[in-house]
Amino acid sequence: MLNEQTLTKMHELKLFGMAKGFTERIGQAKQTELSHSEFMGLLIDDEKAHRENTKMTRLLSRAKLRQQACIEDLDYAHSRGLSKQVIIELSRSQWLSSGQNILITGQTGLGKSFIACALGNQACRAGYSTLYVRVPRLFEQLHIARADGSHFNLLTRLSKIEVLILDDFGLSALTDIERKDFLEIAEDRYGNGSTIIASQYPTKEWHQLIGEPTIADAICDRIMHNAHKLELKGTESIRKIKGKDIKK
């Protein structure tokens, strides 16, 4: 009866991790003669693990990652210039705590989106709020927001995301309004969060893609000077290679 009352109180206090492990820990205490402090320590560990897992699940859901990718699944067998050592360094998450950016470039089919999503997954696992969005869709959302009066609020929400993933940058040249929006995003995020940008075009061509030299200078300065650059090489699409393997 006392244990049932304790479990009820744990649920009332929203100590769901403790409640889930309570019965198991009692059995463990009887078998191994745990001290009171050891018993409480294990229950606290259960609660901590539960909260961390709940937070990670919530962050992954809100991230809206395009692909279910993780760093452990990255393929280094294909010749595309992806350095395993660089990915290992990025997996340690120092770039996140330092607010650094990651720029991923290479021709279509080389796995840029997958790598970006894998890094986004890693960020969620490290406890950072993350959001994936394709650049054309982002500009569309900003256009709609400007029309309905929520433009400032959307920019504010984007500035508060700790890791913003911008995929498919440069599919078309930026309009004047898009340039200004991109500058606002880059300015708001500078020093306040990390941005991952994936593009088919090498970074040396981004200035031209953005257009208007003054704004292009301002944007490139904010996103490039503290960025890790993953420049993927090769011309054969990984999708085509895997398709050939399946047919064999």
Image: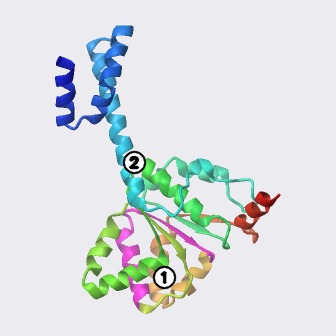
The residue pinned by badge 2 equals: 56
In what quadrant of the picture does the C terminus appear?
Answer: bottom right
Q: Position of residue 151 (x, y in %)?
A: 29, 80
Q: Position of residue 66 (x, y in %)?
A: 51, 64
Q: Residue at x 24, y 34 (%)?
A: 15
Residue 39's disc number:
none
* Nearer to us: label 2 or label 1: 2
Image quadrant of residue 194?
bottom left
Q: Nearer the viewer, residue 122 or 14?
A: 14
Q: Residue at x 20, y 23 (%)?
A: 4
* Residue 200 falls within the magenta-colored stretch: yes
Q: Position of residue 123 (x, y in %)?
A: 45, 53
Compared with 19, 1 (above or below) is above
The residue pinned by badge 1 equals: 217
Compared with 35, 71 (above or below) is below
Q: In this image, 73 relative to 11: left or right?
A: right
Q: Residue at x 36, y 41 (%)?
A: 52
Mark 2 and mark 1 lie on one chain; the one further toward the N terminus is 2
Q: Nearer the viewer, residue 165 or 28?
A: 28
Q: Position of residue 231 (x, y in %)?
A: 65, 66
Question: Where are the magenta residues, as a range?
Answer: 177-202
